[in-house]
Amino acid sequence: MVQPVADPLPKARDRYVDFLRAFSLVVVVIWHWAFTILLINQTTVSPTNPIGFTRGMWAITWVLQIMPVFFFVGGFTHRLAFDDYTKGTSRRFLKRRTKRLLIPALGLISVWIGIGFILRTTIDPPWTWPAVILVLSPLWFLVVYLVLVGIAPLAIRAHWRWGELVIVWLLGLAAVLDVLRFSHEQGWAAWLNFLVIWGLAHQLGFFYDRFAAAPRRVAWMFFWGGLFSLVALTNMGFYPRSVVGVPGDRFSNMGPPTLAIVALILLQIGLVLLAKDWVSKRLDTSPAWQRAFNWVNSNSLPLYLLHTTGMAIAIAVLFLVFGYLPPSEPTTEWWLTRPLWLAAPALATYPFLLLYQFVTRRKQDRGATVDLTS
């Protein structure tokens, strides 16, 4: 068996890592609430966004498409957790880590499938299943994340044996797969890059403590390397400038991910390393920051799982009670109502967060392991 030869583990939990994980999920929630345009008609419900309608708005996706940060800090927490389990078995590690995500996710999927069947057997609207799929669509990241959890024992052992070389291999493989996808029309290569590119972000997370302790120029190296790469890739007339899907683009950089997402990973790692001291100081000294951090950290996962449920309820209430549907284009009215589309879904989601916390406390009282924040 390969034994770890580096990476001395921190003795205390890194609050900044907890902050990044929670913050990244909350940014995604706010993005979905505030920047989703729903195309609703008699037969279907489908989403779009204002990026394709608004000149230059693609630039904010380089900051707000923050899933690279989530996978990056996920790699670090998995490396720490796996070290705790090396005295036991990889199976124990996998069981504990997957259980924390699968149980609430499968519960949510079951509830919405049940709602779909009830709607089909009662009022029978043709848009039922498109709407259910739309509500559950943010769970795509959990599928990728669970795959990364599944291969974490192998990835961590590769990290112990080959270290930085694994990063080089993943970078090179991501490039080769894009060539196969776009130049040789090999569709399978696009889907394999889901694993390779998000696996790269996850693998880089194994080095987080080294990066954080390194001179500040290392953070600037990631920032400038990622920024220059992203600017070059998205201005060569091939890769779209937006790192989220935009109707009208030839393809999405995000699904499946492309080399532009590799550049985004490097850019965002640089940003989070540069922000570490500033954020950590406020987490240590500001009571307001501490209260917000404690609430968000304890609610980030259920908020992510349930935020589209709250949004669906808000849309239904506004339509059934007031006969109002949001515009299907980013008109002046659409922009002016953005505060409403932060407040209404938040209010609709909050009771579900309270229910989730109640169920969690009940399980804790019975001695079950329910820590879903790590």
Image (cartoon, rainbow, N blue to C red):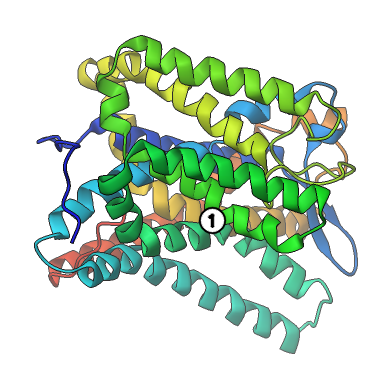
- In this rendered view, identify the residue nearer to me: 358 or 77: 77
Image coords of residue 229 (percent x, y): 64, 23
- In this rendered view, identify the residue nearer to me: 197 or 70: 197
Image coords of residue 337 (percent x, y): 74, 33
Picture quadrant of residue 16: top left
Image coords of residue 224 (percent x, y): 55, 15
- The answer to whether residue 325 of the structure is visible from this angle is no
Count of number-bearing discs: 1
Q: Work out whether 218 lies above or below 177.
A: above
Given the image, on which type of amino acid does mark 1 rest? Leu
Q: Work out whether 336 lies above or below 75.
A: above
| Residue 246 in the figure: left or right of residue 134 | right
The crowd level at tag 1 (other Cα within 10 Å; few <14, some 14-19, many 20+) is: some
- The residue that mark 1 highlights is 195
Picture quadrant of residue 208: top left
What residue appears at the point 51 percent right and 63 percent down from the top-left corner?
143
- Disc 1 element: helix
What residue appears at the point 14 percent right and 36 percent down from the top-left corner?
8
Image coords of residue 369 (percent x, y): 20, 65
